[in-house]
Amino acid sequence: RASETGLPLVYVNQVGGQDEIVFDGRSFVMDAQGAVIAQAPAFQDYIGLMQDLPAQDAPSDDSLFYQAMVTGLRDYVEKNGFPGVLLGLSGGIDSAISAVLAVDALGAERVQCVMMPSRYTSQDSLDDAKALADNLGVQLDTIGISDVVEAYHKVLPADAPSIMFENLQSRSRGVILMGLSNANGKMLLSTGNKSEMAVGYATIYGDMCGGFNALKDLYKTQVFALCRWRNAQEGGAVIPERIITKPPTAELRDNQTDQDSLPPYDVLDGILSCLIEGEMPLDDVIAQRGYSAEDVYKVERLLTRAEYKRRQSPPGVKLTARAFGRERRYPITNRFVENSHKR
């Protein structure tokens, strides 16, 4: 607009979170030629003369995303009157970065972590969760779920599909965490990422329980990158290296990994980005991006069928123009997949 009108432009933006929306500040002054000549800092309140603030280099996506999630989580907790947050700490990467975000947003004294091991929980996961909690200085409670799961087993069909018994573990954890939330008033923080929510790789009324999810609009590959970025910041690494490098797993059965059910995350996220942010036809995803037809069709089918889960997921920080919820909301009852695969 400055170039079109030949007039200087002043852009003023607020700072803070409102539910899913986060305002990043970065107010600026643009001269009549369209060059930014002064800019306020990102995610900081500023009162002063703009002439004292020269134009700044654009922050990295990792930096902006992280600051947005910290701001969104902090303001959601503060403005809704919660004394703090609690979350299940599994020893995996999603709960790890969620715990770090919570500490950066609220302080360690307002963050409670709970490790809930089952017979399938590895010693590595127990050790990694403790190491992270020690690094962050947060409270870590350990509550085993074996007795709870066994009680459910006794009243449910013994010949049920294995998925029922896997989901019972996740739902047992959800019940315990929600009970603790009721007991102490802290908000339960959900820790699922956009990749999982896209394809329904989450247990409804289980690990989807929670009042807010800072990772909701962040793909799994971005979670890995953000952990690396956070560990490189001042103060040193807080997330143990093994949490970042070990294969992701829900640990709901022996020798389970995420790739038993899903394509590798670099492939999955690439396809999801084409379908969600790019809104590309399936044939173009296959022809132009080189993904296999089998993977593309599978991901599209999972994406479409998981809509009902996304409708029941907690709110979370919006980072993209195609965040689930307001920006991408499809009918639950549909024939999209059936029609899209016809030739």
Image: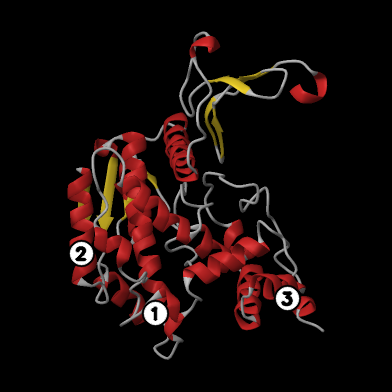
Q: Is residue 51 left or right of residue 12?
A: left
Where does the image place residue 16, in percent across and percent down from the top left? 51, 29
Q: Secondary structure at mark 1?
A: helix
Give the numbered dot on residue 165: 1
Q: Is there any visible trace of residue 134 in the rendered image?
A: yes
* Visual colour scheme: secondary structure
Classify mark 1: residues with Cα within 10 Å, few (<14), some (14-19) or many (20+).
some
Where does the image place residue 35, in percent across and percent down from the top left? 65, 24
Pick the residue in front: 250 or 154.
Answer: 250
Pick the residue in front: 226 or 339.
Answer: 226
Q: Of marks 3 and 1, which one's residue comes earlier in the chain?
A: 1
Q: Using the image, determine if residue 52 lies above or below residue 247.
A: above
Where does the image place residue 207, in percent across and percent down from the top left? 42, 62
Q: Of marks 2 and 3, which one's residue comes earlier in the chain?
A: 2
Distance from label 1 to label 2 (Cα)? 22 Å
The three-letter code of the residue at mark 2 reads Leu
Residue at x 39% of width, y 35% of height: 82
Residue at x 37% of width, y 48% of height: 229
Quarter of the picture holding the C terminus:
bottom right
Distance from label 2 to label 3 (Cα)? 41 Å
Q: Using the image, determine if residue 19 lies above or below residue 8.
A: below
Where does the image place residue 274, in percent across and percent down from the top left? 65, 63
**Residue receiving disc 2:** 126
Q: Secondary structure at mark 3?
A: helix
Give the numbered dot on residue 337: 3
The three-letter code of the residue at mark 1 reads Phe
Q: Residue furthest front?
A: 33
